[in-house]
Amino acid sequence: MNYQRNHIMKMKQIYTFLLAFSFVPFTACANDGWPSQYGGVMLQGFYWDSFDATKWTNLQKQAPELGQFFDLVWLPQSANCGGTSMGYDDLYWFSNYNSSFGTEAELRSLIQAFKANGIGTIADVVINHRKNVSNWVDFPRETYKGVTYELKSTDICSDDDGGATLNWARQNGYSLSSNKDTGEGWSGMRDLDHTSANVQTNVKAYLDMLLNDLGYVGFRYDMVKGYSGSYTKMYNESSKPTYSVGECWDGTNTIKNWIDATSKTSAAFDFQFRYTVRNAINRNDWSYLGKQNDGNWPLISTSVANGSYRQYAVTFVENHDTEKRSNADQDPIRKDTLAANAYLLAMPGTPCVFLTHWQAYKQAIKSMIEVRKLAGIHNESATLNFASTSTYYAVRTSGTKGQLLCVVGPGAQSYVPNGQWVQVLSGYKYAYYLSPSMETAWVDLSSGNYEGEQTARLSAISESANAQLVYTLDGTNPTANSAKVSSGSTITIPIGTTTLKVGLLIGGVVSGIVSRQYEVTEEIPFNPYTINVYVNTDKVGWNRVNFWTWGGDGSHAPKNGNWPGDAVTTTVSIGGKNWYRSSYTINSLDDCVNFVFSTNSGSPQTIDINDVKQDAYFEISNETDGGKNKVNDLTNQLTSVNRVLNDAQQKSQMYNIQGMKVKNNVSLPHGIYIQNGKKVVVK
């Protein structure tokens, strides 16, 4: 308390000093957990079981593109958890960063690549609970920079697991902490006692390592309701992250109280924003966006302490805990995710886009982000409910450079806004308008790689009724003598490399130039194909096999929707062995199937097998990982496909199994490729 009082006194003295000498007024606390008037956009760079899609190496390849639109990317907890894991059963903090997403070297390379492309990386920090090594109460002993860190049984809350841990400890000669949990309990793993000096020392060192060794810029704290917010304050004041956001899954008052408990050293996810969007869409009442959600206003609402919490609101419409999964309904938005993102990206707070939405609607979301940043929308921007009915909702958000009017709902296209507005984007159940005072050109097609000729719509954002648009396709700045079109016209972006520049032409003067860079290749149609997946059980002696399937485009769920999925009885003999076989259709370059194999009623079972896109042969191993059988991939040994590329084949575009175009060359590395919608195996 003395430190806090002295700190406040010191800040008052500094503030008085600055005013006395007419310096810039002091407006923000140095410990703010999120920057004031922050205009950045965040991406949640994973979804549940995205092990292959979001390998560190796969994300690194996307860094140049992501850096054009996102300022922050949130990664899953990145240390080893003792097996295939999304990271929420965290085990190692210091010594083992070879995770389900890649190696430590690949993680470091990814973070550096993000940094080089203007992206800050957010670490998922799981410190409410921790996994044990071999029994209920032991933790890893890790040495980092010459210091040994180890949590003890006495660092576990006395009421962990409803008292079950204490009973086990007493029966086996261990002691727990004498302190109860400072937050909500969770029986999945051991709840840590954050009043413990040893826990605090370990956590502080861990966070320091994430920031100053691995290179993260901030934290997403998992399950913050599990311990008092005062400890988040303690940890943030020690580590000083630039960004901090907590998962406080609750009503507005609880979230506000948690932010206050951290002394605003942390922001929080605006769950009420998410609930309001979900309810508006699922209930087919878009006016709901301007209402409370069961008595709770979104954190960004001006009805919440006059909007003073907007700075600390990280908004979202879906995440890995709410998305629909193949084996659980969760709490998803059932439709209209594109309109949901249009609303998200037009509002104050710091929007966090969900990866699957980015993948599904990349081009539209790119343009939405560009409009947001063009208008200068930030986390504290003011909003005005413009108009609403059950079929549409219109909201005006004021940025530092202009005003954005967002209209969402089935009536968005028929709604005509009052006043002078220029429509810059329009799509399924959404429309964006900008205020004409911005005096700039606009192009609705974002920079990027495309297949097939594209069209770009050019708009003049101007108060001048005589404004025209001039443009070039060769990268030179347009002049009064360049090609001219009226606002709202479309132009063709041809095959090849094109640098489009567009400017306003008013009174013979060109201003407000915007630029786009395009790489356009010939469009090659994808033909769906069938794959066969074979499983051999000789090593484990299983006399039946269940296939549990999920992932890809969502069409691969088992016919039996309950665990353990489909009992496969079809067998074939290959190489003198008996193989259980099932077939699946791959519908696009991004499609895939994920598997868990099991026997009997679901136990024993295998580890997860992810991202299967071609014929595959799996042998169940008698070796285990975390109690689950490992799987040997024998595909390369047993595949019978072997083609030599002829001249005609070389001329058609080929893709690798990750969906990336490759150069047509007879010296392609060994592997499986997609060509004209068919598999080609190069040996």
Image (spheres, rainbow, N blue to C red):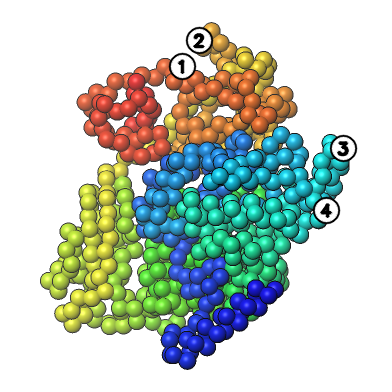
On the image, which quarter does residue 569 sit in?
A: top right
Mark 3, residue position: 171
- The residue closer to the viewer here, 73 or 511, is 73
Check disc 1 and report the residue beneath it.
638
Relative horizontal placement of residue 328, taking residue 46 as reference (left or right): right
Query: Of label 1 and label 2, which has the lower sequence position?
Result: 2
Q: Which residue lies under the disc numbered 4?
A: 178
| Amino acid type of the residue tagged 2 in the rendering | Gly
Label 2 belongs to which residue? 575
| Amino acid at circle 3 | Gln
- Quarter of the figure with the N terminus: bottom right
Tag 1's secondary structure?
helix
Q: Quadrant of the C terminus?
A: top left
Height in image: 418 above or below 209? below
Q: Residue at point 24% right, 81% down?
A: 466
Cβ atoms at labels 1 and 2 below 8 Å apart: yes
Crowding at mark 2 (Cα within 10 Å: few <14, some 14-19, many 20+): few
CA gap, disc 4 to disc 2?
62 Å
Label 3, label 4: how far apart the Cα atoms are: 17 Å
